[in-house]
Amino acid sequence: MKTRNVLLGICFILFTSCVVKSLHPFYTKETISFDKNFIGDWRDSKNGTWKVVSFISEMTKDNPVAKMKEDDLKIYKEYKNSYYILREFEGKKVLFIATPFKINHQKFLDFFPLDHQEDIDNLLESHSVYTHSLVKYDVQKNGEIEIKWLDEDKIKTLFKEQKIKIKHETFGLINEDYLLTANSKELQKFVEKYMASADVEKWETSTQFTLHKVNARN
């Protein structure tokens, strides 16, 4: 029981731990849709701060394209239409690459953690496999942005009730967690079907934020 409680505690600390995880991105290059309005400084509904810049500007800040090594150039080309996000909450900082895309006019973000995070034990880090998560992205009339992660409990229920078929693996101490292993095109078909479902609570989640812009950035 003590071990279980510790695991649940970790789930609450790392806000990406209780969301749907995928081995592959939820976007394809054809669906990427960059929105400059997301760039800036934000404060969320839980009093965390977000710094959002274009991935290009962050990567070329001290590393001009002309002088990039081959591996850096590959990363630059892969994420040139993505955001570099720094979130700080209660003194803890986490970094993400977020790639914006659209499915049937609905905006989404594909979140992927950057490695070498602060305050993570090296041995623990060596056992970590970073995954992609899906975020529903909506701009409100007042300019605020609402972001909601696809909730893991929702998908668990659908799997247990055999209401969805998509490639996946289970993992964890008792194989209680799900990792989607479908390719990006299959993931997008899944998201399309999920969006069209009659479940009015399909986007209900404990992992959501309302972002208020506090300072524009170029």
Image: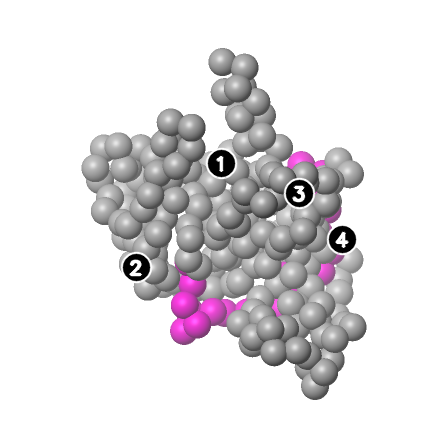
CA gap, disc 4 and disc 2: 38 Å
Q: Does the magenta stretch include residue 27?
A: yes
CA gap, disc 4 and disc 1: 28 Å
Task: Provide the residue designation for mark 3.
Answer: 122
Please report whichever mark, 1 or 3, sits nearer to the chain's N-terminal start: 1
Q: Where is residue 83 in the image (x, y as percent from the top left)?
A: 62, 63
Q: Give the range drawn in magenta.
A: 26-49
Task: Provide the residue designation for mark 1.
Answer: 18
Q: Nearer the viewer, residue 76 or 80?
A: 76
Residue at the spot 30% in from the left edge and 59% down from the top edge: 186
- Residue type for callout 4: Val
Q: Where is residue 21 in the image (x, y as percent from the top left)?
A: 44, 46
The vertical placement of 36 against 193, above or below, is below
- Residue type for callout 2: Glu
Task: Name the quadrant of the C terminus.
Answer: bottom right
Please report whichever mark, 4 or 2, sits nearer to the chain's N-terminal start: 2
CA gap, disc 2 and disc 3: 34 Å
Structural crowding at the residue carrying mark 3, measured as other residues with C-alpha within 10 Å and reported as few (<14), some (14–19) or many (≥20): few
Task: Provide the residue designation for mark 2.
Answer: 186
Please report whichever mark, 2 or 1, sits nearer to the chain's N-terminal start: 1
CA gap, disc 4 and disc 3: 35 Å
Q: What element carries label 1?
A: loop
Label 4 with label 1: CB-CB less than 8 Å = no
- Outermost residue on the left side: it is 162
